[in-house]
Image (tube, rainbow, N blue to C red):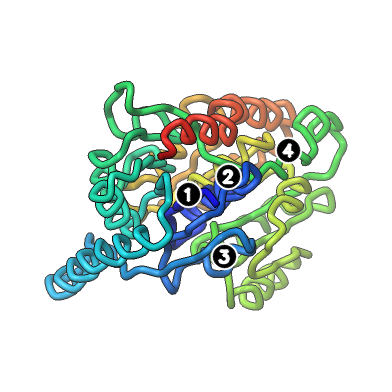
Amino acid sequence: MKVIAIIASGTGGHVYPAYTMALEYIKKGYSILWIGTKNGLENRVIDNESITIEHVSSQGIRGKNFLKKILALIYFVKSIFQCFIIFRKHKPGLVLGFGGYVSVGASISSYMLSIPVITHEQNAVAGTANKINYYFSKKIYETFPLSFSKTNSKIIHTGNPVRPSFDKVVDPEEKYSDINASINILILGGSQGSSFLNMTMPFAISHFFSDNISIKHISGLNHDSEVREKYRKYDIDASVISYSDNIIELFDWSSLVICRAGSTTISELAKIGRASLLVPFPHATDNHQLLNANHLAINSATILLEQKEDFIENFVTIVNILLNDQKRMYMLSKNIQNIFPENTNQFILDDSLKYYK
């Protein structure tokens, strides 16, 4: 059996596009060796007998005190040897990494064993790990153009892999055709939820809520009761859930999505075409969420609203305008569909397999 190694761990931004590509390779007859960590989201998401998961030691270095940096470096060196042993055992013919510190040791081990490495960058600015992986990689796939601040034959603007099931949702032409249709607002804060959106949305929405508006809010684990009570305080009948495994159904239902600016969420919005208001997480590494959102905003593909003191006032003004301008929401939904290259999954599949050894 031919084996491809996928390297991804941590949050949905790394794991979901990696899992999407893993399933594409499986359909082509490959088995998948997944390198992750014991606490990563991949352990909850992956459900396929053709995928073997191996755990390695990995910790980020940035933002830590001196002792924790030393410990992280020890884990890093350990991960190189762990990956070396795992690769010798499973003998993959290709390694595809999706960033994060777990990927660096795997890239170095692959290089030492002469296994071709391809790196995918999800955000508008390359992370520290992928800046290192660049030097060990045959190819670099980037979701946003110029995320590495350079252009050459090694770097290809591919977009971000999105599950094929997103093709089945209602398209913008149908979604925004009826000017009298109710407005379905979906609020989500990424795979880990957003305390800021949980805290501000019930009060902000109370300024314009009406019978023509429906609210669904994904709060993040263990926060649903608290958020539900906030909506009740303002007499808003909102559906609040902590987490959903069926995000596609929620996107299909929505006509306006209010969310953070992670690459996976943005790519899914672009795939289906939905009007959105993005609130970048202000503490994201290298401020990548602001850069992600800004790329869309300058192309009239979203509304960008930063998390600042005047957020609620600006939010109420902007959303009031959107709710009364169906054509504007339709324009946003169509423009976001044109942000990324088409056929991303197929391109990455075909191009990467050229390097299989």
Q: Tell me the residue that label 1 is attached to.
A: 4
Marks 2/3 in contact by CB < 8 Å: the verdict is: no
Dot 3 amino acid type: Asn
Indicate which disc, 3 or 1, sits on the residue closer to the N terminus: 1
Instruction: Give the CA distance from mark 3 to mark 4.
Output: 29 Å
At mark 3, the secondary structure is helix
Look at discs 3 and 4 and give the one toward the viewer: 4
Instruction: Give the CA distance from mark 3 to mark 1.
Output: 40 Å
Front residue (pair 44, 91): 91
Look at discs 3 and 1 and give the one toward the viewer: 1
Marks 3/1 in contact by CB < 8 Å: the verdict is: no
- Give the side of residue 122 with respect to residue 28, left or right: left
Q: Residues within 10 Å of mark 1 (few under 14, many from 20)?
A: many
Q: Which mark is residue 167?
A: 4
Indicate which disc, 3 or 4, sits on the residue closer to the N terminus: 4
Spot the residue most to the front.
Answer: 1
- Give the side of residue 167 with respect to residue 286, left or right: right
Residue 52: percent from left, percent from top: 52, 64
Indicate which disc, 4 or 2, sits on the residue closer to the N terminus: 2
Look at discs 1 and 4 and give the one toward the viewer: 1
At mark 1, the secondary structure is strand
Residue 292: percent from left, percent from top: 43, 39
The answer to which image quadrant residue 182 occupies is: top right
Residue 211: percent from left, percent from top: 84, 53
